[in-house]
Image (cartoon, rainbow, N blue to C red):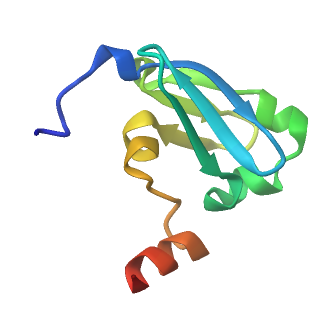
């Protein structure tokens, strides 16, 4: 299986940030949920900043302009936390 193949269904449909999760709905019907602690900029942003997101990267990315954060559906699907977070350190230790 080639992970670099483009799957149009993996485009971002909607994003919700709760106090502890990022929830991303994709056009193919899947929902991705990851801990907010994986992305410190989002974790430390206020709720209004978290609500201010835009689809980017041809539909496969999410951009939060006020906090200069960018995530991709590919990274979210792989379970890739931000570099340098404690989640990254725990994954390497496993």
The quarter of the rendered structure image containing the C terminus is bottom left
In terms of image quadrants, where is residue 16? top right
Q: Position of residue 64 (x, y in %)?
A: 67, 35
Residue displayed at 53% across by 73% down: 84
Q: Is residue 37 above or below residue 71?
A: below
In terms of image quadrants, where is residue 80? bottom left
In terms of image quadrants, where is residue 57? top left
The quarter of the rendered structure image containing the N terminus is top left
Q: Is residue 48 above or below residue 68?
A: above
Q: Position of residue 90 (x, y in %)?
A: 50, 79
Question: Looking at this view, is 55 or 18 the one in front?
Answer: 18
Q: Is residue 44 left or right of residue 59?
A: right
Which residue of the protein is positioned furthest toward the bottom in this rendering? 93
Residue displayed at 46% across by 44% down: 76
Q: Is residue 59 left or right of residue 31?
A: left
Residue displayed at 47% across by 25% down: 30
């Amino acid at each position: 299986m080639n992970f670099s193949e483009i799957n149009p269904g993996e485009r971002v449909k909607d994003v919700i940030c709760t106090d502890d999760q990022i929830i991303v709905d994709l056009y193919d019907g899947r929902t991705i949920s990851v801990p907010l602690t994986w992305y410190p900029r989002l974790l430390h942003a206020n709720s209004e900043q978290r609500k201010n997101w835009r689809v980017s990267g041809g539909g496969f990315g999410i951009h939060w302009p006020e906090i200069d954060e960018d995530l991709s559906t590919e990274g979210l699907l792989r379970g890739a936390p931000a570099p340098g977070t404690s989640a990254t350190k725990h994954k390497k230790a496993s």
